[in-house]
Image (cartoon, rainbow, N blue to C red):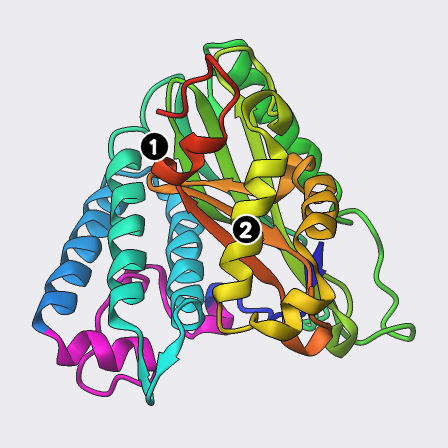
Amino acid sequence: MRHRLLSILLLACLGLAPSQAGALDCQSPARTDLRAICRDPALKAADERRIALYDRIRAGLPVADKPAFAAYENGWLVARSGRCPMREGEIDKRCLREAIDEHAAELAALDGLVGGPAGRLRFRSRKKADVNPNVDIHATYVEFEGPQTAAERLFNEQVLKLVNRLPFAQSIDPRTTNTWQDTIDVRTIYSSPRLIAVKFAEWVCCGAYGSGGFYALNIDAANGTVLVPERWFHLDEVAAACWYQFVDGDKGGEPFRRLYPLREAIERFGENLRRPSIWSFSQRGVELQFSSLMGYASGPYTCRLGYAELARSTVAGFQLPP
């Protein structure tokens, strides 16, 4: 599943140095999320706690890990500006607070898990050197250094397989195209005794004709295998929960209900839910990425289920993460 998005994955494109990735600028906030944070003491305090976590983790990282870690944080910052809906000209503050708290929880879980001895996660980056400044082929990702378990080894294998899809060794002929972009960047990371999960943002070739999307990698840590969603969840029940969420959402309503009657939607969504690459886990629950269900202009649909709600759809005897 892919949808069009801006190629904002390099630090240079963001106009930020690694040390500025977590900065909160209230002197001239340009984005709606920043303006809301700077005007609201509770939001500002929450974001300052998030920044303190980021700064502490970054300070303890090996030098080689810091650029990829900064790119990871910058990617979250830019995505935050478009995650929450607008209400009467103002960004939804409740949604914004949830986004900040969720990312702070992710950082808190990473604190102590990254940049350390064997068996710890390391932030990595790889970029194709090209004389043409319009060629951008790069990856930022995480892997276990000195993996200790079958799940950690499988995670590394799957991540490197994804990274190695990029045409690092390919010669780009400027007479064919002056702009070429193939990028993969880590966006979210979740690790527990039950699950190792990471979501990547992808952008694929070429300039104005490029396309992007998200790809999630989920490893069943208990069994050392790639996640098989139907072994964990009753997919028809998950599909129904997402249908109700979409119908009640800003892009739903009666037109959505007519196009996707419940019974047909459960069957169609269930097929999509069998793909582990659309399941993105976090400290709070899961995001499920669907395509542009109401046409290209509507953009992608994202179903967000907390663990309490998701627990209603689990297979008997299965215990959700963590």
Task: Tell me residue 173's x, y (percent).
Answer: 88, 66
Residue at mark 2 to residue at mark 1: CA–CA distance: 34 Å
Which of label 2 and label 1 is nearer to you?
2
Which residue is at 49% across, 57% downward? 245
What is the quadrant of the C terminus in the image? top left
**In the rendered image, which residue does mark 2 sit on?**
242
Which label sits on residue 114? 1
Q: Which residue occupies 14% across, 81% down?
A: 39
Quadrant into which the N terminus falls: bottom right
Looking at the picture, how far across and down is residue 82, in whole percent?
Answer: 44, 72
Q: What element carries label 2?
A: helix
Q: Residues within 10 Å of mark 1 (few under 14, many from 20)?
A: many
Q: Residue at x 41, y 29 (%)?
A: 121
User: Is disc 2 in contact with disc 1, using a CB cutoff of under 8 Å?
Assistant: no
Q: Is mark 1 on a helix, strand or loop?
A: loop
| Sooner in the amino-acid sequence: mark 2 or mark 1 | 1
| Amino acid under disc 1 | Val
Give the label on residue 255, or none. Answer: none
The answer to whether residue 140 shows anywhere in this view is no
Tell me where the magenta segment starts and ends, as one range.
12-40
Residue 150 relative to residue 181: left or right: left
Whether residue 75 can be seen here = yes
Is 26 magenta? The answer is yes
- Which percent across, then down, holds residue 54? 25, 50
